[in-house]
Image (spheres, rainbow, N blue to C red):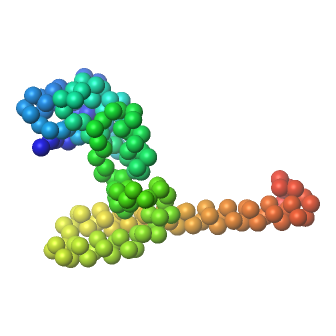
């Protein structure tokens, strides 16, 4: 049994390290773990980078007496490894990373590429819909959240496709210029 906490309610709580007192209480009452989200409640999680140093501080404080799980800004398995190396936390809790990657973060074979996420979007959305029906349908907000997540994945796929087309066009133009003797840096008139 464990809890998930943040660094506090605001920057002042973070500065005063109230999360360390909460972790100490969790250890004293016999919890098995604390998942520490490395932001405070007032942080905008999309605009503010998680501050993993606090996870390291928490782990250094409790040592082996309590499991510390890190949370915040983990979108790939490499991110999870980096968090564990930098903070010495005992494990990683993934939240938005699992939605952003349509769950592929949990597949050891996934290489962290957006192409695979975008290619899997339709199949995964159908699977989500099947599971939702099987278990009585999603709550309204949860359904909206997942629809928006899949919309964003498809938008990333469209941007990725456009970038790939532009790269192919640029490569073709460089080749044409080289063959015409204008060199790869020739300007077009």
Q: Is residue 41 visible?
A: no
Residue positioned most to the right: 181
Residues 14 and 116: in front is: 116
The image position of residue 158, as x and y in percent, is: 52, 67
Q: How many marks?
A: 0
What residue is rendered at 28% in x and 66% in y? Answer: 144
Say which residue appears at 69% left-offset and 65% top-offset.
168
Quarter holding the C terminus?
bottom right
- Between residue 62 and residue 21, name the one nearer to us: 62
Q: Quadrant of residue 188?
A: bottom right
Furthest residue in direction left, as rendered: 29
Q: Is residue 179 above or below residue 77?
A: below
In the image: residue 16, left or right of residue 120: left
Residue at the image position 81 percent from the left and 63 percent from the top = 175
On screen, 30 above or below 118?
above
12 on left or right of 107: left
Residue 120, x across and y down, in percent: 42, 69
The image quadrant where one finds the N terminus is top left
Residue 65 seen from this side = yes
Residue 12, quarter of the rendered image: top left
The percent coordinates of residue 29 (x first, y second) are 7, 32
Q: In this view, does 26 lie above or below 75?
A: above
Does residue 99 appear to the left or right of 187 in the view shown? left
Residue at 86% in and 60% down? 178
Residue 143 lies left or right of residue 73; in this view the side is: left
Quadrant in which residue 128 is drawn: bottom left
Image position of 183 with respect to 119: above or below = above
In percent of width and height, residue 35 lies at 23, 40
Residue in front for this viewpoint, 144 or 23: 23
């Amino acid at each position: 049994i464990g809890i998930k906490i943040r660094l506090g309610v605001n920057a002042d709580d973070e500065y005063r390290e109230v999360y360390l007192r909460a972790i100490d209480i969790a250890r004293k009452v016999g919890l098995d773990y604390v998942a520490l989200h490395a932001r405070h409640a007032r942080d905008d999680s999309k605009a503010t980078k998680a501050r993993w140093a606090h996870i390291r501080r928490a782990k250094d404080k409790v040592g082996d007496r309590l499991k510390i799980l890190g949370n915040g800004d983990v979108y790939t398995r490499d991110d999870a490894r980096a968090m564990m190396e930098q903070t010495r936390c005992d494990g990683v809790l993934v939240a938005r990373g699992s939605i952003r990657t349509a769950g592929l973060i949990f597949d050891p074979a996934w290489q962290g590429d957006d192409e695979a996420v975008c290619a899997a979007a339709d199949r995964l959305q159908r699977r989500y819909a099947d599971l939702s029906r099987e278990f009585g349908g999603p709550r309204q907000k949860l359904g909206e959240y997942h629809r928006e997540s899949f919309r964003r994945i498809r938008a990333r796929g469209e941007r990725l496709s456009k970038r790939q087309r532009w790269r192919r066009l640029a490569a073709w133009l460089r080749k044409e210029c080289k063959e015409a003797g204008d060199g790869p840096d020739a300007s077009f008139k």
